[in-house]
Amino acid sequence: MTLPVLTAHAERARAALPAAVHEFMASGAGDEVTLAESAAAWSSFRLLPRVLRDVGVVDLTTELLGDAFASPVGIAPAGYAGLVRDEAEVAVADGARRSGSLYVVSTRASRPLEEVAAAVGGPWWFQVYMMRDRGLTRGLVERAVAAGARALVLTGDTPVVGIKRRVGAARIDIPDDSFLVNLARHLSPGDALAPRAAAEQDPTATLDAIGWLRELSVLPVLVKGVLRPDDAAACLDAGAAGVVVSNHGGRQLDRSLPAALALAGVVDAAAGRGPVLVDGGVRSGLDALVALALGAQGVLVGRPVVWGLAADGADGVAAALAAVRDDLAHVMALAGASTPADLDRSLVVPPPGSR
């Protein structure tokens, strides 16, 4: 069940945002089967708590790729936050800073990367699309590295953008000042007449993109959008430092498996070769507990942060993260775990018929 503060934020966001913006942010692809199932899938697991364990202090400190965060609950990349609030990703970054949370900043950010990085004031990761014009991707990655990004998160599940039937398009009509805020300076002369086409995702991108990004930046590269165990293994074989289990918030291929049901198989395939994170439908500390017990090292939330931003700016983002974090600490104590390391698969009973 969604935490009350997250529900309140969602209701306030619906009232505050223009209808077209709200529908775009809330929508999923196709018939929205995956969108509906993503949150419900976490609730299908049952728990086997341990008793008589010392849980007087619950410490959520989490290390990811050498950096320490206050909890395993971080922020998934979400583009065009400027449609939601003028402060856009700067406010999201401020909320991340207050919470000590990982922020994965979107390629489609509405504010300059340098401003967002300064507002984070700590470790952050940069989400990458392989664009038709590789020069755009190169320019953004180089700027992210210079601004202090600690890892790159290559989105692999978006060769083309999924159609959202609820809004009748792949995406809302994004004003040029939002679409090009980080891209304009990297456009080559040949792109001048068709910058949006140059900035679209490259449907010919392959696993070779992982090595290209590693050579370009020397940063660890994680691949986001992985649902298949064999894809996880292939990404790691190609040089990825880790993977993010995700169905893109139900916004790409409809009827894709919920991340909750794909997670265990990907963790097994990764076999400890790199961190596995997960996003999609996490709305409470109980959801996060299940994810961590199944083997995720980090849990990312997307729409709850967007709705928090719409409701209260940076305060709303911080409140959303705090709600999930505090609920996680509470349910971990009830489960007999004082740190995320105490969570393992013996604590969860998967739903019947799951893989």
Image: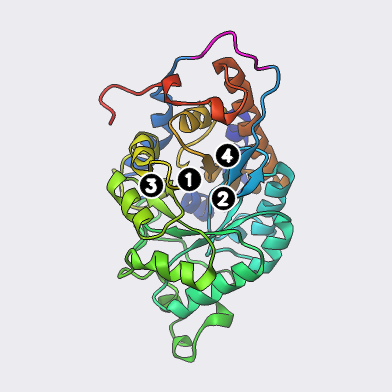
- The relative height of residue 101 versus residue 204 in the rendered view (above or below) is above
Of labels 2 and 3, the one closer to you:
2
The answer to whether mark 2 and mark 4 are in CB contact below 8 A is no
**Mark 1 / mark 3, whichever is N-terminal:** 3
Q: Secondary structure at mark 2?
A: loop
Q: What distance separates the C-alpha of mark 2 from that of mark 4?
A: 32 Å
Of labels 3 and 4, the one closer to you:
3
Residue type marked 4 = Ala
Residue 74 percent coordinates (x, y): 59, 44
Residue type marked 3 = Asn
Of labels 1 and 3, the one closer to you:
1
Q: What distance separates the C-alpha of mark 3 from that of mark 4?
A: 21 Å
**Which numbered marker is on residue 65?**
2
Residue position marked by numbered label 4 in the rendering: 10
**Mark 2 / mark 4, whichever is N-terminal:** 4
In terms of depth relative to the viewer, which is nearer, 295 or 199? 295
Residue 229 percent coordinates (x, y): 30, 44
Q: Secondary structure at mark 1?
A: loop
Q: Which residue sits at x=54%, y=81%?
A: 186
The answer to whether mark 3 and mark 4 are in CB contact below 8 A is no
**Which numbered marker is on residue 247?**
3
Residue position marked by numbered label 1 in the rendering: 275
Q: Secondary structure at mark 3?
A: loop
In terms of depth relative to the viewer, which is nearer, 317 or 344? 344
**Which numbered marker is on residue 138?**
none
**Mark 1 / mark 4, whichever is N-terminal:** 4
In terms of depth relative to the viewer, which is nearer, 240 or 290? 240
Region rendered in magenta: 49-55
Q: Which residue sits at x=72%, y=52%?
A: 94
